[in-house]
Amino acid sequence: MSHLLKIFSVIFVMCFLCVFSAQAEDVGKILSITPDNVPRYVETIKGVKLVFIYASWCPTCRKVMPDVVQLSTVNPKSIIALSVDEDAGQLLQYISENYGGKFPLGTTPIVVKEKNSGHLRDILRSIWRTDIGEGIPSMVLLDADNNVIAQGTNITNEAATVISKP
C-alpha cells in the first residue's frame, strides 16, 4: 500500500508540474486553482520565491504592482502572483487595459478560487506558521526550502536582495 501511495504521489506531482509549467504569451490563458492546491504549486517553484497575493480591483495592489513587475525582471519564475479576483474576466480586463494584454510578471496569471473568504490565508498560515495578515496585497518571501524569510504588504526591496538571476 505504501509503495502504491508513493507511485501515485509521483504521478500526481508530475501531472501537477506539467499543468503549471506552461508559460503564457497572451492574456487569454489563466490558471484557476483552489486554495488547497496553492502549497503544492508553490513547492514546484525552485529557489527563493516571492508569493504575491493581490486583486486587480485593489488600489493598494495596483500601487505595488510596478515594484513586483520590476522584481520579476530579475527572475520571472521567482514570482508567484496569486489573484484573489472572484471574476477572472476582471483580471483579464485589468491586464489588457494596464499591460497591453500581456501579463507583466512573465508567467501565467493564477486566480485562486476560494469557496469562502480567508480559506487561502488559513492554509498558508498553517503551512508557513506565520501571520500573513488579512488584507491585500500580501507578500511572503520564501527561501529555497519554503521557509519564510519575510512578509508584509510590500517587501520587494528585501526580496530584491535575495532573489537572483536564473
Image (tube, grey):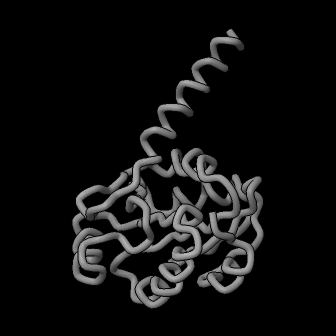
Q: Indicate the position of residue 77 as horizontal and vertical percent values.
A: 54, 61
Q: Indicate the position of residue 33 as horizontal and vertical percent values.
A: 42, 49
Q: Residue at x 41, y 49 (%)?
A: 22
The quarter of the displayed image where residue 138 is located: bottom right
The quarter of the picture where the C terminus appears is bottom right
The quarter of the displayed image where residue 8 is located: top right
Q: Is residue 150 left or right of residue 40?
A: right
The answer to whether residue 129 is visible is no
Q: Residue at x 56, y 79 (%)?
A: 71
- The residue nearer to you, when weighing 50 against 120, is 50
Q: Indicate the position of residue 156 as horizontal and vertical percent values.
A: 62, 82
- The residue nearer to you, when weighing 54 against 130, is 54
The answer to whether residue 90 is visible is yes
Q: Is residue 63 left or right of residue 140?
A: left
Asked if 64 appears above or below 23 in the picture, the reply is below
- The residue nearer to you, when weighing 92 against 74, is 74
Q: Indicate the position of residue 151 as horizontal and vertical percent values.
A: 69, 75
The quarter of the displayed image where residue 55 is located: bottom left
**Outermost residue toward the top?**
1
Q: Residue at x 55, y 48 (%)?
A: 41
